[in-house]
Amino acid sequence: MTSQTESLHVILAPDGVRPQSFRWEGRALRVLGVESVNTFGAERRYRVRTGEGRFELGLFTDVGIWRVRRSPTWLGRFWARWQNPPRYPLPAWRRRSRRVAAQVPQVAAPLLITGGVHADRFAVVRQ
């Protein structure tokens, strides 16, 4: 069991039952999924999956203290990064939409009226 319980801060999900994220040793870790929940006496253990690996968080329900029971090793961190590769856009031949040059209708040239510096900006209005 880790002796650094004072540096662990857990934020619960809106349902108030499972952890949503936690801050441990200065790192903020978001819980991607809860793999299992076990109860051992007054302790409730959550096995959670984060971006850095799997952790086991323990909540002592009688006193309300959270503890980290197990932290990932370097191999666990590598495995977690390998399982969650970054998402890249599909290649051009695999996309569902294609870029097509838009057909722009030809607009008639504006009427040019001579007779002044700003005359090309005015339009003739017939009533």
Image (cartoon, helix red, strand yellow):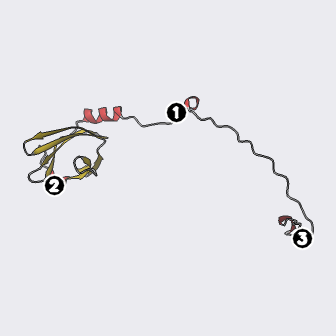
**Mark 2–mark 3 CB contact (< 8 Å):** no
In which quadrant of the rendered image does the C terminus lie? bottom right
Quadrant occupied by the N terminus: top left
- Left or right of residue 83: residue 59: left
The residue wearing badge 2 is 6
Q: Examine the rendered structure and indicate whether residue 64 appears above or below residue 55.
A: below
Which residue is rendered at x = 14% and y = 44% of the image? 44
SS state under label 3: loop
- The residue depicted at 30 percent of the width and 32 percent of the height is 79
The image quarter in which residue 51 lies: top left
In the picture, the disc for residue 34 is none
Q: Position of residue 2 (x, y in %)?
A: 13, 45
Q: Indicate left or right for 56 with 21 as reference.
A: left
Q: Hey, what amino acid is under mark 3?
A: Gly
Between marks 2 and 3, how big is the CA–CA gap?
80 Å
Q: Which residue is mark 3?
A: 116
Give amino acid for label 2. Glu
